[in-house]
Amino acid sequence: MSFEDRLKRIADEKERLAAEEASMREEAIAELVRLDAQIATLEERKAQIESILGLDDANNRAAHGQIMQLCIKFLSENGGGLTSSQVKDFIASENPGMKLSSVPATMSRLATQGRARRDEMGRYFIV
């Protein structure tokens, strides 16, 4: 087999792997979109059930997306990185009484979406 033939095989293999990687990435993005839609549906259903049970407290519940906006705000203001507990504390200091149980999940979702990154110490940074 000639050198050119080997180079051609290597180039073909690289092209095949790139196409496979692109396909897997598209599938992963589609799955992420599907999961985000499911989460939104579940959050909506949770709010409905809380309302029926009289558990909703409009004063303490954050509006849809408000927790995420607050998380992004505090991460942006603190370039050194923050843990989800620190972000939760910052939000609580500005919004006393707000229910913040979803902050860790929101931080994780930001990292999954590529809007933030998490280091080995558990600190999040805006990307």
Image (tube, rainbow, N blue to C red):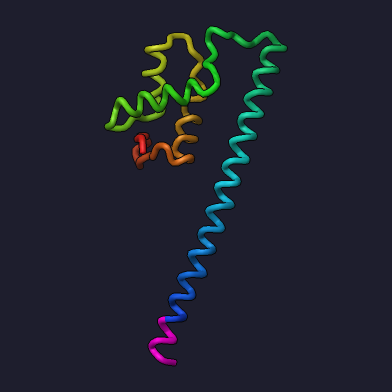
- Rendering quarter of residue 50: top right
Could you tell me residue 92's position as x and y percent?
41, 14
Q: In which quarter of the image is the C terminus?
A: top left
Could you tell me residue 72's position as x and y percent?
40, 27
Position of residue 102 relative to residue 36, above or below, is above
Position of residue 73 relative to residue 60, above or below, is below
Q: Is residue 14 left or right of residue 33?
A: left
Q: Which residue is drawn at 40% across and 17% down?
A: 91
Q: Does the magenta segment cover residue 110?
A: no
Number of marks drawn? 0
Could you tell me residue 98's position as x and y percent?
48, 12
Position of residue 2 relative to residue 111, above or below, is below
Which residue occupies the extreme right position in the image?
52
Q: Residue at x 44, y 86 (%)?
A: 5
**Residue span colored magenta:** 1-7
Q: Quadrant of the N terminus?
A: bottom left
Q: Is residue 14 left or right of residue 81?
A: right
Which residue occupies the extreme bottom position in the image?
1
Could you tell me residue 19's position as x and y percent?
52, 64
- Rendering quarter of residue 40: top right
Q: Which residue is drawn at 50% across and 67% down?
A: 17
Q: Which residue is drawn at 47% across and 9% down?
A: 97
The kind of secondary structure the magenta stretch mainly shows is helix
Q: Does the magenta segment cover residue 2?
A: yes
